[in-house]
Amino acid sequence: MSHEINSMAFTGEKPWHGLGVALPADAPLEIWAQCAGMQWQICESPVQYSVASASDPHYEAFKNHKVLFRSDTLAPLSVVSKDYHLVQPSQVLEFFRDLVQTQGYELETAGCLRGGRKFWALTRMQEVLDLPGDDKVAGYLLMASSCDGSLATVVIPTSIRVVCANTLHATLHGTESGVRIPHTREFDADSVRAKLDLARQQWTDYAHLMQSMARKQVSAAEAVRFFELALGGVEANVGEPTVFKKRRALQSMQTLYSGAGKGSQLESARGTVWGLINAVTEFVDYGRRTRTEDSRLSSAWFGAGARTKQSALEHALFML
């Protein structure tokens, strides 16, 4: 089976995909880098192409572009413009060193996706929200980057629901979640760390929203309409039938919401907007939306799954 996750380290319970190296909570970052497969460097070289002929064998330069490759295996990663600013896998872990050592953050996962084209680290903050029914939601900070242009360098506040490990990035009211540095600019770790108070404020705002969602009751019809909209349903006037093609996904979300989902029977989720949100996030994080089980993480954090969860969050705002 082809794996999206090429290497990974974690603390605590084994991830759902069964991959990775288990580490103690107090493991130094150097061990994290080794076990997460993040010790290698991204190297670069000018791009050349063959224009060989029998009479004149030679290479020409592909101007204004460079090829990126791994220092350990020499495997190619991508061809990018000459102005593409690199972030090394080790920089992602180093970003958290001070936060882990002095501010109580705890690294929980780190690793590489798609042969090293994407890499990430996820660390737990001190913020924890208690919702009715002993439903705990913990605050996290996700940092990720890429070397193929598919993802800017991002530092994103993320929530994880303890009972089911559902993840949701806290992007609210059309605001930019966390910090995003495009690869057209140099990554300045100190400057990003200075903006982490913004991430904490976003968590506070999101905590208030989660409390409102846990209080807001919804009808069965409102629940169906919510799932349709989260999955990209077509708007229709009240009383008119909705043409909807993603029936299997819709039914799966309804099943999770109605009692099959982890934590769906807790007071915070039973018949509430918070229950709707978690049915969507559980479906995206653990449902069969992708060809291989281990590609779910990439989809849930950075791809189609992340967009579905964001759509659900935006529609939830209109229900409060």
Image (cartoon, rainbow, N blue to C red):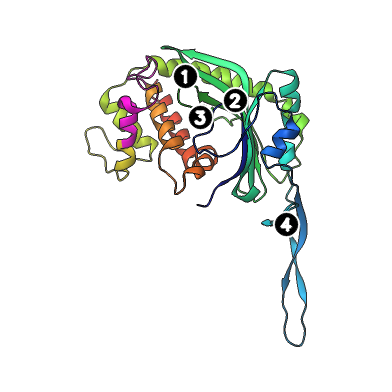
Category of crowding for the residue at label 4, using alpha-carbon neighbours closer than 10 angstroms: few (below 14), some (14–19), many (at least 20): few
Closer to us: 21 or 105: 21
Q: Earlier in the sequence, mark 1 or mark 2?
A: 2
What separation in Å lies between label 1 and label 3 (alpha carbons)? 11 Å
- Give the magenta-colored segment's residue range: 252-272
Of marks 4 and 1, the one in the foreground: 4
Q: Which residue is mark 1?
A: 210
Image quadrant occupied by the C terminus: top left
- Would you say residue 235 is visible in this rendering? no
Q: Is residue 238 visible in the rendered structure shown here?
A: yes
Tell me which numbered mark, 4 or 3, is placed earlier along the sequence.
4
- The residue to which callout 4 is attached is 74
Is the Cβ of the residue at disc 4 closer than 8 Å to that at disc 3?
Answer: no
Q: Are marks 1 and 3 in contact (CB under 8 Å)?
A: no
218 part of magenta stretch: no
Is 268 covered by the magenta stretch? yes
Query: Residue 148: x percent and y percent?
Result: 65, 51
SS under mark 1? helix
Depth check, front residue: 142 or 152: 142
Q: Which residue is mark 3?
A: 168
Q: Nearer the viewer, mark 4 or mark 2?
A: 4
Circle 1 crowding by C-alpha within 10 Å: few under 14, some 14–19, many from 20 = some
Instruction: Please tell me which residue is depicted at 75% across the width and 55% down the height of the picture.
Output: 82
Q: CA distance from mark 2 to mark 3?
A: 10 Å
Q: Earlier in the sequence, mark 4 or mark 1?
A: 4
Label 3 is placed on what type of residue?
Leu
Label 2 secondary element: strand
Quadrant hosting residue 139 = top right
Identify residue type, mark 2: Tyr
Mark found first going from the N terminus, 2 or 3: 2
Cα–Cα gap, marks 1 and 2: 15 Å
